[in-house]
Image (cartoon, rainbow, N blue to C red):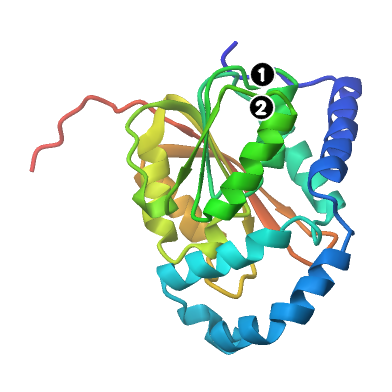
Amino acid sequence: MRIMEKLGQNAKEKLISGFEVFLEKHLRPGELSEIVDWMGKHGNELNSRFPLERSGSYSDPELRELFELMSVNYGGLTNVEDQKEIFSELLDCGISKGRTLSIGCGLAPHELYLISQGLIAEEFVGVDTSENMLKRTRGIAQKEGITNVSFVQNYGSDIEYDNEFQQVFLIDALAWMRSWKQCLIKSAKALENNGTIFISHSIYSPVVQINPLEIIKTLAECRVDVKKVSGMDGHAGTPRSIIFGKKEQASGFIIPG
């Protein structure tokens, strides 16, 4: 089958346990000494260049610069329980072994772990605005012996793929995109007919606040039938929406003007 059948409970629990080990190995959550040291040296500069009160009006180039700075120590503040819950939702929705696109992939722990377990077998393409982040992600892939991957530095709203992927992931990415609607339109265009999209969306963001209903509406306009919508409280106090949809084939009917 193109999409995995439901996992048995034992298999699912084993995968989630392995994913936790993967996070500890590569993201080093809770190891904050490097972050504290870096903030001690650069915190004042960061706060003066990117004051929180202006966060809702950062331009795309400013956001890219901010992400480059954040990527240096990204991972230490990861909440493992939150990421395990997102991973569990991803498994419940089903995984295609086919060609996969992840937008705003960051260090791509969910994606690279799925590849390491053979659950994604064809090419994986990760897109992120931060070259420093992608450099670290390439390093993780290399350490895991993963070769069927490529990475592209780009805005999610600027990708240009057409009917090329069996699944698209947007994991905690949309809330950092000022042009999030354009990103969704491009994501749907990238999907093959019957391809799927998985979105983990943080409701609260210092950059842009997006009502999940607007996400669903935009997907519907792009022929993506939303199959699942659920809420996730978040162990770190960051509520999320989980949205999963399937791209339908065009009807072929011509509607008279």
- Quarter of the picture containing the N terminus is top right
Identify the amino acid type marked 1.
Met
Of the numbered discs in the image, which one, if any, rests on residue 4?
1
Q: Secondary structure at mark 1?
A: loop
In this rendering, the answer to whether 209 lies above or below 252 is: below
Instruction: Provide the secondary structure element on which disc 2 rests.
Output: loop
Disc 2: which residue: 94
Instruction: Answer with the quarter of the image where residue 159 lies.
Output: top left
- Residue drawn 83% across and 56% down? 79
Q: CA distance from mark 1 to mark 2?
A: 5 Å
Badge 1: few (under 14), some or many (20 or more) residues near its Cα, within 10 Å? some
Name the residue nearer the viewer: 153 or 236.
153
Answer above or below: position of 155 versus 197: below
Q: Earlier in the sequence, mark 1 or mark 2?
A: 1
> How many residues crowd around disc 2 within 10 Å: few (fewer than 14), some, or many (20 or more)?
some
Instruction: Tell me the quarter of the image containing the C terminus.
Output: top left
